[in-house]
Image (cartoon, rainbow, N blue to C red):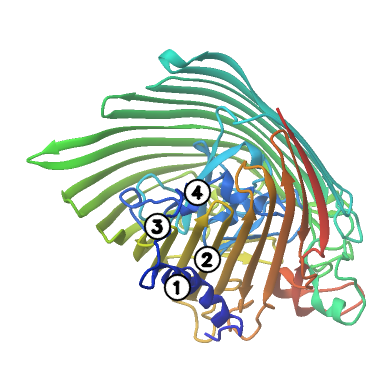
Amino acid sequence: MALPRFLPSLCSLFLLPVSLHAQTSGTKPGDQPTEMGEIVIEGKAQDLLGIAYSASKGHATQADFLSRPMLRRGEIIETIPGMIATQHAGGGKANQYFLRGFNLDHGTDFAMSLDGMPLNMRTHAHGQGYTDLNPLIPELVESLDYSKGTYTAADGDLSTAGSANFRLWDHMPQGMVKLEFGEYNYYRTLLAGTLPLVADAEHGVQQGLTYALEQNYYDGPWDVPEEFNRWNGLLRWFKNDDDTKLSVTLMGYRGTWTSTDQIPSTLVQDGTLNRYGTLDPTAGGESERYSLNIAFEQRNGNEVTRANLYGIYYILDLYSNFTYELAPGPPTGDQFQQAEQRWVVGGNVSHSWEKLELLGIKSDITVGLQTRTDFINGIGLWQTQQRNRHTEIRQDDIMESSVGLYGEVVTHWLPKFKTVIGVRGDLFFFEPQKSTVAGQDGSVAGIVSPKFSAVFGPWHETELYLNFGTGFHSNDARGVTAQIDPADALVRTMGAEIGIRTQAIKTVTTTLSLFWLQSDSELVYVGDAGTNEPGPGSERFGIEVASYWRPSSWFSADGEMALTRARFVDAPAGSEYIPNSIPVMFSGGINLGAQGNATGWFAASRVRIFANSPLEESGTVRGRDSMLVNATVGYRRKGWEAALDCLNLLGRDDNDISYYYESQVPGRPAAFDTHIHPMEPRMFRARLTFHF
């Protein structure tokens, strides 16, 4: 695997905290030792020794993601080391995600949830596991818990690469009115806060109503304005005391947009098309999501019960055109519509017994039950022209239901050795209720997934981890229920990891992991269909390293790097590369000045690089390296804050995504080409926040 020229210099960034510590920790005879003030470490720099069961498990807070300038809110997920979020169409469409050599497309093998509600949509009109983060309001997210690999018993479907759970604030630290504006008609307003209803400090009772209303508009640099208009709302009632937490949360989102889909790079190179141009000005869509989530947690001594029940209503109406006039027949173009509406109902319940003791050996035991049912109506695919249907491909009504039962035992065998043994069993029901395609039969499938982790240490504030587990992803119900050549309902995946986490230097948190992942069938993106389909089996292994340095209250720095080798394992010779698997990824940044809510000047800069991606199975066609640098500077007082962001600071003409497939431009013969969606140009955005 050829590495980019910039890689050696990036590697040196990980050694910087260690070398600086070595230089400052040595003293000369007669020197007086300098006592360092207490430093509060939170977020990804938090000391997780004795808590985490793997090197790739972590916790991020608002301090991690709101301190970084972001082009789009989906980039909040980039607080997970090695994760990349880009876009290949309009802003209202789910992001394109990449992690551990997976082109996760819009979700596929990475499970995301919000306070226990699933964000992934299985059997989705546009692609399995579709995960849209537009319903999130970043300022309302308190924290993000993430894990990678197949080692966590509570993680089920679509979690081969890992999982993430966003947690919302019950009581916001302070209310806010935020105003943002920037180039290309970018506007955003947010009103959010908490109304305290009961505050009984003596008995530890807290009750309140948290609210938020957001509106966002953006045209973008595109020749055809994006006109992305987004509304978000949230209302949460909560009541907490020392032992019990209860919340009821209503959320709503609606977005409409016009897309500039990926375009052939040849047309850009010969000047036929602007980088920000389009071959179909009527692509785009609209989406809505409304949800109700009731969450409960109660502690009784060393026992903890957690539960939530949710209901979700979701619609998507999406028009895309990736191949222009490739399809045979009348010259009506290749625009197609993917649409659906669904109800999702489900819940989770778990019970934990902590610090149980048997024959002098302490154990923590957790058992849990998860269930989900999707009632999917009118999920379909149509050929369209300028958003007018002219040919129906297929339309279905589907019910897909699942139930999962899991258990996990953490055993403290010795003061510096413990194991985590888990197992989960999942049962799926696929029921076609109506279809325009003949020969659809109901299907039932089950799978059992064992998990194992061992934790050694800590010695000198350092722990070693060994992890192994199996997992799975489900396939689209329309393929599973087909009578002719049906797809496997549940696809087995397997992973292993060896890792290390060290806090040997008090102000530096460093993790290192070597991982291996295997899947019996890869979900592969198909350009001319605009979706992903089951493909050959695959295998990945790689290394991830992350380091977070917080030496003072006014300075912090971090660096994260991932190197991955991803291949198909049962493909013909010369066709083993996995398209859009990213072999090299780096992310790093610095924060200066007032951190968190401290008053004064502050500044931050962040770089994200991904490189050397194969675009087709032979590995001969590769995507361009991409580097994005964002920066921010601002000033904060007790009641207000002003900041200026510069996105794509270097003004690079890189691409967010590249694909390689066959298309036909009007007036030209069909041909294979690299299709690109460009990174947005340098732009400035200002924001003004008032706190109350």
Snapshot quadrant of residue 135: top right
Distance from Cα at disc 2 to Cα at disc 4: 15 Å
Q: Mark 4, mark 3: which one is toward the viewer?
A: 3
The residue labelled by disc 4 is 43
The C terminus lies in which quarter of the figure?
A: top right
Nearest to N terminus: mark 4 or mark 1 = 1
Relative side of 432 to 368, left or right? right
Whether residue 137 is situated above or below residue 146 in the rendered picture: above
The residue labelled by disc 1 is 23
Within-10-Å neighbours for mark 3: few <14, some 14–19, many 20+: some
Residue 486 in sight from this viewpoint:
no
Nearest to N terminus: mark 2 or mark 3 = 3
Q: Mark 2, mark 4: which one is toward the viewer?
A: 4
The residue labelled by disc 2 is 560
Nearest to N terminus: mark 2 or mark 4 = 4
Which amino acid lies under the numbered mark 2 shown in the image of this protein?
A: Glu
Q: Residue at 54% x, 66% y: name it.
A: 559
Within-10-Å neighbours for mark 1: few <14, some 14–19, many 20+: few
Instruction: Determine the secondary structure under disc 1.
Output: helix
Nearest to N terminus: mark 4 or mark 3 = 4
